[in-house]
Image (tube, rainbow, N blue to C red):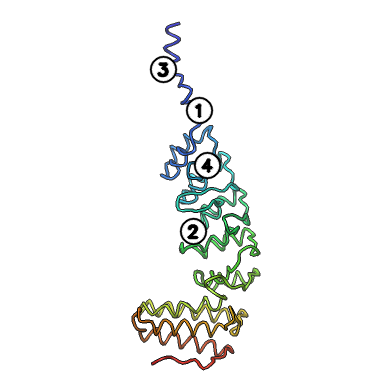
């Protein structure tokens, strides 16, 4: 009996060690990107439970872009539909929206392979993953949009999407959204898509040389493309036309005492925008610059 007790002591772990790991422990291992530890902890764990912050292991993996860990968690039954709140988030979101927000394209593809709902609404604003792409600049907006559109994403629940896309995406991606039937609805703070496209020219005043020229050329190319796609140069937003809004912002920037004076490139860029809009039929309404 003494020998049996010794064997039990040496080879049978205590009850606490046989219990599934806590969610905090698993999520912490995910945050550190420790695949070996995740593979150990996930066995027998409640893989979809949340830690003390409200994050699931899968949402944390999507936040950090750990593709191998995402694959491991999905293999062990993690649900793609359960919201979590990883660090840096004020409200819970689905894994696909989190991956889209941070531009983790490979993770997005793996989630979609795992049958993630491409249109699942989440967050306090109840928006789909397509809207999450434009929460902040991740540099992968074109690829993210392409992946979601290819997966059949609906444009119905993404308000102001086109106004956001014109500031972050290429003309080709914007054209793909228009072809897919995206709404020309104005986005809060950005205005209609055409106004959102030309506004960067005004704020190029703080850059000089190549940077200012690149901002201007990109904005002009986008505005020209939008006009060819059917954007109305005389559309009104909040009681004023696009040209009136552009005029007011340009004048405010030029006359501001808290900002340095416009450089020559900035002035030329604004004039080129005006010429483009007028050629498209926009009315100037006696606009002029203060020399």
CA gap between label 3 and label 4 equals: 33 Å
- Residue 274: x and y, percent? 50, 88
Label 4 secondary element: loop
Using the rendered view, name the quadrant where residue 109 is placed: bottom right
First in residue order: circle 1 vs circle 3: 3
Labels 1, 3: front one: 1
The disc, 4 or 1, on the residue closer to the chain's N-terminal end is: 1
Q: Residue at x 42, y 45 (%)?
A: 33
Dot 2: few (<14), some (14–19), or many (≥20) neighbours within 10 Å? many
Q: Earlier in the sequence, mark 2 or mark 3?
A: 3
Q: Is residue 273 left or right of residue 160?
A: left
Relative to 134, residue 117 above or below: above
* Location of mark 4 (residue): 50
Mark 3 closeness class: few <14, some 14–19, many ≥20 residues within 10 Å: few
What quarter of the picture does the N terminus occupy?
top left
x 58%, y 40%: residue: 77
Q: Which mark is residue 259?
A: none
Task: Name the residue tied to disc 3.
Answer: 10
Q: Disc 2, disc 3: CB below 8 Å? A: no
Mark 1 — residue? 19
180 or 29, nearer to the observer = 29
Mark 1 and mark 3: Cα distance apart in space: 18 Å
Element on which disc 1 rests: loop
Q: Are marks 4 and 1 in contact (CB under 8 Å)?
A: no
Q: Is residue 140 left or right of residue 264?
A: right
Mark in the foreground, 4 or 1:
4
Label of residue 103 in the image: 2
The secondary element bearing badge 3 is classed as helix
Using the numbered discs, state the Cα–Cα distance from disc 1 to disc 2 in whole angstroms: 36 Å
């Amino acid at each position: 009996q003494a020998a049996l007790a010794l064997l039990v002591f040496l080879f049978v772990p205590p009850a606490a060690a046989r219990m599934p790991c806590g969610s905090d422990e698993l999520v912490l291992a995910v945050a550190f990107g420790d695949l070996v530890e995740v593979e150990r902890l996930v066995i027998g764990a409640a893989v979809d439970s949340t830690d003390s912050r409200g994050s699931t292991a899968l949402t944390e993996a999507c936040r950090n872009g750990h593709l191998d860990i995402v694959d491991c968690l999905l293999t062990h039954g993690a649900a793609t539909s359960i919201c979590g709140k990883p660090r840096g988030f004020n409200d819970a979101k689905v894994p696909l929206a989190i991956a889209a927000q941070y531009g983790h394209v490979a993770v997005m593809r793996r989630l979609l392979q795992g049958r993630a709902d491409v249109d699942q609404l989440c967050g306090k604003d109840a928006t789909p993953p397509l809207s999450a792409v434009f929460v902040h600049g991740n540099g992968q907006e074109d690829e993210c949009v392409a992946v979601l559109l290819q997966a059949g994403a609906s444009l119905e629940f993404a308000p102001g999407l086109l106004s956001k896309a014109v500031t972050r995406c290429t003309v080709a991606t914007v054209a793909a959204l228009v072809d897919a039937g995206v709404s020309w609805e104005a986005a809060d703070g950005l205005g209609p898509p055409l106004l959102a496209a030309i506004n960067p020219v005004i704020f190029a005043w703080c850059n000089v040389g190549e940077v200012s020229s690149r901002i201007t050329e990109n904005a002009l190319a986008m505005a020209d493309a939008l006009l060819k796609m059917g954007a109305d140069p005389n559309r009104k937003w909040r009681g004023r036309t696009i040209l009136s809004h552009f005029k007011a912002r340009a004048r405010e920037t030029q006359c501001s005492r808290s900002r340095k004076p416009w450089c020559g490139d900035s002035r030329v860029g604004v004039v080129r925008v005006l010429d483009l809009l007028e050629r498209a039929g926009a009315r100037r309404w006696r606009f002029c610059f203060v020399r």
